[in-house]
Image (tube, helix red, strand yellow):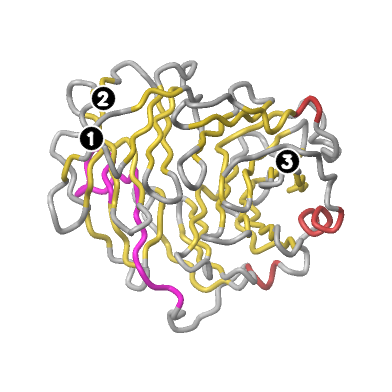
Amino acid sequence: MGLHRSGIERVLLVLGLLFATSCTGREADHARPSERPIDPRLRGSILVAGGFSPGAPQGGLEVINVETDVASLVQVPSTHFIFFGALRNDGSILGVVQDGRGRIRAYAMSVEEPARPLSPPLPTEGFEFSFDLAVAGDVLLVADCDGGADSYTLDLERPSAWRPVRASCLATLSPDGQRIAASPDGQTIVTSPADRRGPAERVLDLAGLDGLPPGVADDPEIVGSLAWSDAGLAAVIAGGSRLAVAVVVPEGTITIVDIGDSSAGFRTSLAWEPEGAVLAVASETHTESVVRSLDLSSGVGSVLGLSDEPISDLVWSPSGDVLLAATVFSWVYVDPGGVWLRKVPVNRGRGTPVGWSS
């Protein structure tokens, strides 16, 4: 998806008010999940990465049955450390592992079958990387956190070789895997062709961005991971005391939404609804975590729930009718209307959800 900046859309006042609205009076609706049979929408499996369960050493991968909460280990090559795990578009599992010689390699993995190598090994010893998988599931990005010179992409349909690219840490692929978006300096977002055949393009620059809310406009900085879908490219902007989300839509205009107070050591998560225009946002204040939604197609924003635990990750169900908000001690399933469907206590060693398959 190409992004061409043709102008700046000022703050959507209605959305800003909705997002900043205090949840007093609504807390009773979300504070306790109702006691009821398992909702029929709670089906399928969730891939979890980075856990510390006794059966999954080296930060392995597990598959959690949504209905029963039973975990099954993904088969990982012995003596290998899991760097990254994700679900491809067809529901298969992709794992990136490091061997004892400092090389990384992509594998096709499952619960039933031994891991199968997809790529040649890539020497990476001494480097720090972040990873991303295109929504379409066919392109893997390995982004160098030390200047971007040693970054690579891998075409999973033809994974015979790694392609060198330039991409800074926490870079993100477009849904079709054709472009890379990154914020190399915390002040701009730049997109470039994943195959390096074409110039880079600056699509957001905080220095010239109008409409940042009060508190965000004070020393603004782009923080955390970007999130890219067909509906737009989203980033969290932190200022002196508040947070905002900026979304660059395909036409190039920019929507800015205030998402409330920031906190010391704050954490944010972004997740686009599959094949939709709804962006889920989790942010922390000094006292609680807030989950919000922003619907770009209708211009409606709302608070979905509150939690007294920090929310580490957001994952949508394949059909986009349930959102999982994961904390250290519990997983909360909520529907797009804000109704809590289920709350599941989890062990601290479980790890973080990275994908939901049907």
Considering only vertical position in the picture, is 16 above or below 100?
Answer: below
Q: Mainly helix, strand or loop, the magenta region?
A: loop
Of labels 1 and 3, earlier in sequence is 1
**Residue beneath disc 3:** 243
Q: Specify few, some or many for label 2: CA neighbours under 10 Å numbering under 14, 14-19, or 20 or more.
A: some
**Residue beneath disc 1:** 119
Left of 74 or right of it: where is 6? Answer: right
Q: CA distance from mark 1 to mark 2?
A: 9 Å
Is 13 included in the stretch rendered in magenta?
Answer: no
Q: Residue at x 64, y 63 (%)?
A: 305
What amino acid does circle 3 point to? Answer: Leu
Q: Residue at x 44, y 80 (%)?
A: 40
Residue 81 visible, this angle: no
Is 49 included in the stretch rendered in magenta?
Answer: yes
Which region of the structure is painted magenta?
Answer: 41-61
- Secondary element under disc 1, as helix, strand or loop, is loop
Q: Do callouts 1 and 2 mark residues in contact (Cβ within 8 Å)?
A: yes
Corner quadrant of residue 97: top left
Choose between 307 and 352: the one closer to the eye: 352
Corner quadrant of residue 98: top left
Numbered badge on residue 169: none
- Secondary element under disc 2, as helix, strand or loop, is strand
What amino acid does circle 1 point to? Answer: Ser
Q: Residue at x 46, y 32 (%)?
A: 194
Q: CA distance from mark 1 to mark 3?
A: 40 Å
